[in-house]
Amino acid sequence: MRYFHLIATVLGIVAGVILIAKSCEENDSDKKIVDSIERHMADYPQSTLRDLYKNYFQDRFGPGHIISDKSAADRYLRYELESSTTFAGKDYEPTGYEGRFYRVNLGVIKDGRVEYEKYLDAFVRSVNGIKQPSIDEWSREWHKIDSIIKRMNLNLPNAEQDRATIDSMLNAGKVVMHHSELFNKHYAPHYRIIEREIFNNEILPLINKK
């Protein structure tokens, strides 16, 4: 009897440790999300919920949804470089709250710090090895992020309308969303998504060199 009581006590302790560890992990995750939202809104105060969604979506899905093949990626990248007159904003910034990818400004090509072919190759290779979540997994993660956004009372324009649009999109099995017109008007973003390790090893040294 005493033996079984000991076993029950040990199992209870183990379960308690697991619950505490899980709670700490969730709290750490929540803090990362809050920090990333605050960072994003400080840099882009004219953001909408769509723009926040896109940031976290990119962190999970990378650039795969916009690369059908290298030649198509090449054509559109050349067109954007040739047709754009300004490349305002940061040279680079991490996506989401895990920073699995970086948004890298096309300006680093335009001013000669990164060769075009090097940038294009890094961008295209960034689709390799991506383990994309299922729609259900991504939907659960987004709704956790969105619950934190709600608690932060950011007063985002058209937030409820955007929230309904995102929910409808996810329910239909779709995940891709573009920047809002408001974001494009204020920031005119020109960037591509590059995987973190590729960026740190191959692109960042070139940016820092010049």
Image (spheres, helix red, strand yellow):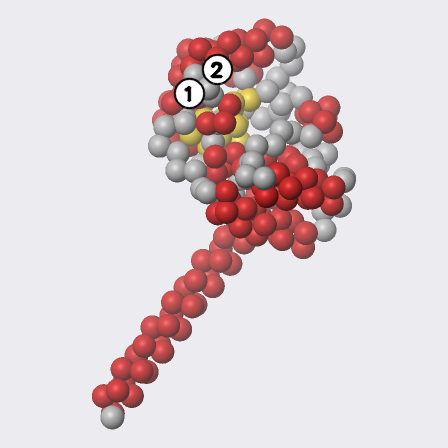
Q: Specify whether residue 95 is in view.
A: no
Q: Is residue 200 above or below residue 98?
A: above
Residue 90, horizontal then vertical, whole percent: 58, 26
Q: Amino acid at mark 1?
A: Val
Q: Is residue 178 above or below residue 1?
A: above
| Label disc, if present, on residue 124 of the rendered structure | 1
Task: Quarter of the image for the N terminus: give it.
Answer: bottom left
Q: Is residue 105 above or below residue 144?
A: above
Residue 83, horizontal then vertical, whole percent: 62, 8
Residue located at (27% from left, 82% from top): 7
Q: CA distance from mark 2 to mark 1?
A: 8 Å
Find residue 167 and report its image quarter. top right
Residue 196, horizontal then vertical, whole percent: 42, 32
Q: Residues within 10 Å of mark 1 (few under 14, many from 20)?
A: many
Which structural element holds mark 2? Answer: helix
Q: Specify whether residue 174 is in view.
A: yes
Q: Nearer the viewer, residue 42 or 78?
A: 78
Q: Farthest top residue?
A: 82
Q: Nearer the viewer, residue 174 or 200?
A: 174
| Label disc, if present, on residue 101 of the rendered structure | none
Which structural element holds mark 1? Answer: helix
Residue located at (72% from left, 34% from top): 46
Q: Nearer the viewer, residue 125 or 140?
A: 140
Of pointers 2 and 1, the one earlier in the residue sequence: 2
Q: Residues within 10 Å of mark 2 (few under 14, many from 20)?
A: some
User: Looking at the image, do the residues carrying marks 2 and 1 touch, with CB atoms under 8 Å apart?
Assistant: yes
Residue located at (25% from left, 92% from top): 2
Residue 144, horizontal then vertical, whole percent: 57, 52
Left or right, residue 50 beside residue 138: right
Kindly identify which residue carries mark 2: 73
Find residue 174 and report its image quarter. top right
Find residue 123 and report its image quarter. top left
